[in-house]
Amino acid sequence: MTIQTPDWLKDAVFYQIFPDRFAKSERVKREGLKLEPWDTPPNPYGFKGGDLYGVIEKLDYLVDLGVNAIYFNPINASASNHRYHTYDYFKIDPLLGGDEAFRDLLHAAHSRGMHIVPDGVFNHASRGFWQFHHVLENGEGSPYVDWFYFDPERLKRHRPWGAYPDEREQQQLNNGVGSFDAIGYTAWWNLPALPKFNTQTQAVREFIFEVAEYWLRFGADGWRLDVPGEINDDSFWQEFRRRVKAVNPDAYIVGELWLESQRWLKGDQFDAVMNYLVSAALMGWLIGDKMPEFAYRIGGLQRVMRPFSAAEFGDRIEYLLNLYDPEINYAQLNLLDSHDTPRFITTASGDESALRLAYLFLFTFIGAPCIYYGDEVGLDGGPDPECRKSFPWDESRWNQGLHAYMKDLIHLRNAHPALRRGSYKRIFSDNEALAFIRQYMGETYLVVINAGSKERQLHLDLTQTGVSSRAVESLFGLGRATLEGGSLCIEHLPSRQGVVYRLE
């Protein structure tokens, strides 16, 4: 089958926003609401008060940075600050400004040429979800009894019933007893707050498809799918794609899948996945054996994470590119960190050079780069909830050098189509340095990264790459280069830095 993904992804620069923590506006009424001070440490339960009107007021900041697409963590009505506990799929959370705020956001973003992709939480709902609550009230008499996986004995009230575990039930959960046996229904990761949908029930499938269609018609530009691998049913996702693409053929469907994902990326389900495998490879190369133990505990990445030399990293990247059709690779959501991971800068123990080089690679590589809000100003944070700090809008608290670096890097990508749409070819790698070229429409760009602790001199034989060049222009970074015959000579490439050249 011919694989097609939205063409706009090839030019996209994403920015991930955790809505409660990015920005807040006076347009949302907060009288009578107890909110935490903006700069207090994040915790699993408190709300800081970020909202969608606040995002609207910061869109010009994002445009100036060079961003043209936003991925939002969930924005539907929910009783959690992360909003993965959805109780109304057809309403935007009133704490975020409600439906009107989302409508205004879409208009403001689209008028700036930006795309908006919200999070779709379709594997599980919440204890407050109407159909689940209906069963709790009525047991086996509820018309919605097949929407979830319930213990028949509890449905008949032969055993205690409820969605909030008592002390004994909680101890069972803590000891590894599954939620079905401990509390009477299947919950995602045995978390009582997250009852798992029974997507074998046709009414549930239709409900989810209608939600997806509704918000696309409202104006959203696609869906980021939360834990889609938990819905272990190709036919479900194939129908989801058909329904989504029928509303908007250019809608982006990107799944949260952490490991190899060939099953879902054949052109009949998702356009892409969150490319955590590239994230893990970059950590292995640029942080190496200094990675803290917590970096290995996330998303199953311990299976693939290890220190890499530059040559091993180059091999790994080529392996990952060969997993999928080229069209898929150009649509991949390439990230360093997210709401589910420690901040990259924290994983790197504050080594800013590792963060800079990692973003240099992402912004000169195939796929859509994504910045987790605040990375560009040096926001740090360990594992959840520490990685969900509020954005520091006081610019005196920003890492101004990093912000300028990120802005220059994004504008470099936006200015040169070859860095977005070009082919990728590694031409050199050793223990410390990597060089690759991007080619498109007769233009050639060379990216060289020195991850070592010492200055390097490199002689790159271009004749073996099929590249002929009469002149070289430095576009980004330090490292004077000259052409000698068929070789490009870089005299002084500083340690822990990279450079981008245009070959003419």
Image (cartoon, rainbow, N blue to C red):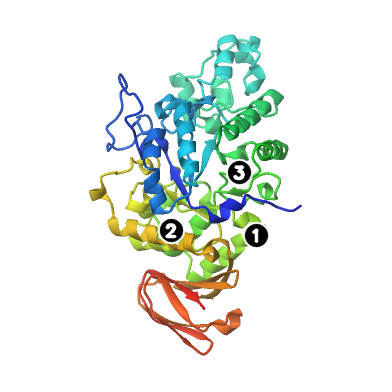
Furthest toward the left, the residue is 396
Asked whether disc 2 touches disc 3, contact meaning CB atoms under 8 Å apart, the reply is no
Residue 54 drawn at (x, y percent): 37, 36
Q: In the rendered image of this protein, does residue 99 appear above or below residue 162?
A: below
Tags 2 and 1 in contact by the CB under 8 Å rule?
no
Residue 6, horizontal then vertical, whole percent: 62, 49
Kindly identify the residue that appears in the image at 36 percent across and 39 percent down: 57
User: Which residue sits at x=43%, y=58%?
Assistant: 410
As drawn, is 267 to the left or to the right of 310? right
Residue type of the residue flagged with mark 2: Ile
Residue under label 1, please give it: 326
Q: Secondary structure at mark 2?
A: helix
Amino acid at pointer 1: Pro
Q: Are marks 1 and 3 in contact (CB under 8 Å)?
A: no
Identity, as a three-letter code, of the amino acid under mark 3: Ile
Report which residue position mark 3 lands on: 253
Q: Quadrant of residue 243?
A: top right
- Can you say whether 25 is above or below 141 in the image? below
Q: Image quarter for residue 304? A: bottom right
Residue 459 position within the rendered picture, expressed as x and y whole percent measured from the top left:
47, 84
Q: Residue furthest bottom?
A: 485
Mark 2 vs mark 3, CA separation in Å: 23 Å
